[in-house]
Image (cartoon, rainbow, N blue to C red):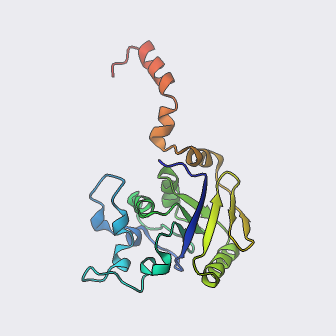
Amino acid sequence: MRPFTIHTGLVVPMDRSNVDTDQIIPKQFLKRVERTGFGQFLFFDSRYRDDGTDNPEFILNRPEHAGASVLLARRNFGCGSSREHAPWALEDYGFRAIVAPSFADIFYNNCFKNGLLPIKLDEAAVDDLFARAAAHPGYKLTVDLEKGLITDAFGLSLKFEVDAFRRHCLLHGLDDIGLTLEHEAEIAAYEQAHGVVA
């Protein structure tokens, strides 16, 4: 998992509440177990027309949002079924951070396990970010996880909080396997002492 320390990225303002995991990655793409390759299917039903061509009305298809890596959303992002493929698709597409007033619990937890930083801000702060994105074409945010700070080129400075354990894991790029491997020497010593056969 890639560490997350400081990231500056182009913002996509997705002005929708209750974006569910089936919108993020539709069910027909859940057959694979690899974490990669899902970005092409992100928001599939909205991004593409029935004939497979790009839907120019969908925000990710607009030229000014090409290469965006910070997603700005409304409340209850990631609701619906508990599919880990949703953060896989977002991360594979290129997103590193998602800013919203609230997230569905399972989606929120899955983000941290897959290298995405979900940031909860109050409604007024999110409203202000949407206004800034509308006022400044090519709007970018810088997210500093170590300092818990979001800034822009127009004087913004917003504090945010992340649980200390999750912060540690993201800063060091540790998923569940990585956390286990931090104790590899102790595990090996235990196995040797107890005659565990690998």
Where, by quadrant of the figure, is residue 11 drawn? bottom right
Asked whether residue 72 is in view, the answer is no
Measured as percent of width and height from the top left, residue 182 is found at 52, 32
**Vertical relation: 106 (above or below) 125:** above
Q: Is residue 64 left or right of residue 141?
A: left
Q: Is residue 130 left or right of residue 81?
A: right
Measured as percent of width and height from the top left, residue 47 is found at 37, 78
Question: Tag count in the figure?
Answer: 0
Q: Residue at x 54, y 80 (%)?
A: 15
Q: Residue at x 42, y 64 (%)?
A: 93
Measured as percent of width and height from the top left, residue 151 is found at 69, 66
In the image, 182 versus 104, the foreground residue is 182
**Vertical relation: 142 (above or below) 190:** below
**Vertical relation: 96 (above or below) 64:** above
Q: Is residue 151 left or right of residue 57?
A: right
Q: Is residue 23 left or right of residue 137?
A: left
Quadrant where the C terminus sits is top left
Q: Residue furthest bottom?
A: 57
Q: Residue furthest left?
A: 51
In the image, 198 versus 9, the foreground residue is 9
Q: Residue at x 56, y 49 (%)?
A: 170
Asked whether residue 161 is in view, the answer is yes
Measured as percent of width and height from the top left, residue 147 is found at 71, 53
